[in-house]
Image (cartoon, grey):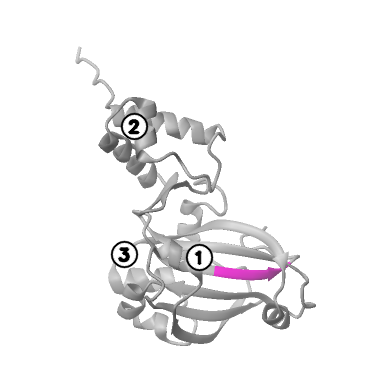
Amino acid sequence: MMPQRKPDVRDTVAADLRDRISRGEYVHGTLLPTIRELAEHYHCAPRTAQEALRILATQGLVTIRPRQGTVVAMAENSIAGPRERMNRSRAGGLFRDGETQEIRRCYLTHGHPDARAAFDVYEDEELGARDYLVRDAFGRVVTVATSFVHLSVWSAVAEIREPRPIPDGIIGAIRRTLGRETVAVPTRRQAGPATEEEAAALGVPDGAPVLVEITECQELDGTVVEWNISVHPADYWVGGA
């Protein structure tokens, strides 16, 4: 009888963190302890703790952000989780049936401060940007949004710089042009008052309640290549039934 292999310490650490995530001890958006803190807690080497986090990242449970930390991702099987969003992206199903996208402009900018933080770039570095609207089957504007794109991707993928819709989205353009797999992962959803510009686009009163979704397009190692902010009327939600 072959002796059973003793689990690696990194597997044990990954399994315990996975269990704590499944129990809800670490919920979506939670920043996990640092590598040093994990190493101290599990009495292991920092490299072992880092390898455990990489295991969780490959499973879609966490997102590793360079110089920022490790964040718990959406549940894999939720409609907004990495696996479902990847499948919907590949199928061109990021929007509801009957919706159409209208590109307002494409340009270079120093970007939204939260976008710069997600990309981990300095204030003087430019980002690509695409402003767009989404209309439902009746022509009503249901989304006003901006996608910020890392300059390396913006420069390499010509479709993203062109002011017209991309049938399979930025994710598809990156895959076809660069051969790199990425996935759209919602990282924050919140309610708030509409700005004057958002209200005008959505056809609601200035300051009316709106729903805001922040979505990151990430490579499989957690590197962010697109950061999107989309605003919807209070009765609408991306990914809803």
- Secondary structure category for the residue under label 2: helix
Q: Position of residue 37 (x, y in %)?
A: 39, 35
- Between disc 3 and disc 1, whose residue precedes? 1
Q: Mark number for residue 204?
A: none
Q: Residues within 10 Å of mark 1 (few under 14, many from 20)?
A: few
Which span of residues is magenta-colored? 229-233
Residue 13 is covered by the magenta coloring: no
Q: Mark 3 = which residue?
A: 180
In which quarter of the view is residue 27 placed?
top right
Say which of 193 and 169 sits in front. 193
Q: Mark number for residue 39?
A: 2
Q: Is residue 91 visible?
A: no
User: How far is mark 2 from mark 3, CA to CA?
Assistant: 32 Å
In which quarter of the view is residue 186 placed?
bottom right
Q: Position of residue 48 (x, y in %)?
A: 28, 34
Above or below 241: residue 145: below
Of tags 3 and 1, the one toward the viewer is 1
User: How far is mark 3 from mark 1, CA to CA?
Assistant: 24 Å
Residue at x 61%, y 60% (from the top left corner): 239
Q: Amino acid at mark 2?
A: Ala
Q: Residues within 10 Å of mark 3 (few under 14, many from 20)?
A: few
Above or below 92: residue 19: above
Q: Mark number for residue 114?
A: 1
Q: Position of residue 139 (x, y in %)?
A: 70, 82
- Between disc 2 and disc 3, whose residue precedes? 2
Q: Is residue 47 left or right of residue 174?
A: left
- Secondary structure category for the residue under label 1: helix
